[in-house]
Amino acid sequence: MNLITELFGYIAIATGFFAITKKEMGPFRVWHLISSFFYIIYGVFLESIPLVIAGLVFCVIHVYHLKKIKRNQVNKPHKL
């Protein structure tokens, strides 16, 4: 493996670990989405279809839930 490939792997791991430090679900999903994106790139460099598929599935799941969180925040009544 070359240095660039390993770098993407380490960034994916680091952002995944950082994601689990988040207590709120929104920031967790954003950081795990970033981690999943780096895993996709890492999987492409490794030519690992299962890693790419898993990253894509996680991205779709996180985008769906982030949109749902955003929709709920918009529809929530504001307190004065």
Image (cartoon, rainbow, N blue to C red):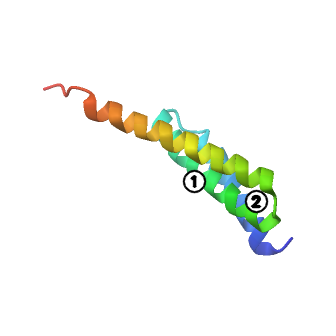
Count of labels in the image: 2
Report the quarter where the N terminus lies. Answer: bottom right
Report the quarter where the C terminus lies. Answer: top left
Label 1: which secondary element: helix
Residue at the spot of label 2: 43
Question: Which of the two residues, 18 or 58, is positioned nearer the viewer here?
Answer: 58
At 26% across and 27% down in the image, what residue appears? 76
Q: CA distance from mark 1 to mark 2?
A: 14 Å
In the rendered image of this protein, does residue 44 appear above or below residue 53? below
Instruction: Answer left or right for 27 relative to 60.
Output: left
Q: Position of residue 16 (x, y in %)?
A: 65, 47
Q: Position of residue 20 (x, y in %)?
A: 61, 39
At 45% across and 40% down in the image, what residue appears? 66
Question: Which of the two residues, 80 or 77, is positioned nearer the viewer here?
Answer: 77
Q: Which three-letter amino acid code belongs to the residue tagged 1?
A: Ile
Residue at the spot of label 1: 34
Instruction: Answer left or right for 19 relative to 70.
Output: right
At 48% across and 36% down in the image, what residue appears? 65
Label 2: which secondary element: helix
In the rendered image of this protein, does residue 56 appear above or below residue 24? below
Would you call the spot at circle 1 few (<14 residues within 10 Å), some (14-19), or many (20 or more)?
many
Q: Position of residue 37 (x, y in %)?
A: 62, 56
Would you call the spot at circle 2 few (<14 residues within 10 Å), some (14-19), or many (20 or more)?
many
In the rendered image of this protein, does residue 65 appear above or below residue 9? above
Question: Which of the two residues, 74 or 26, is positioned nearer the viewer here?
Answer: 74
At 68% across and 58% down in the image, what residue appears? 40
Of the numbered discs 1 and 2, the one sitting upstream in the chain is 1
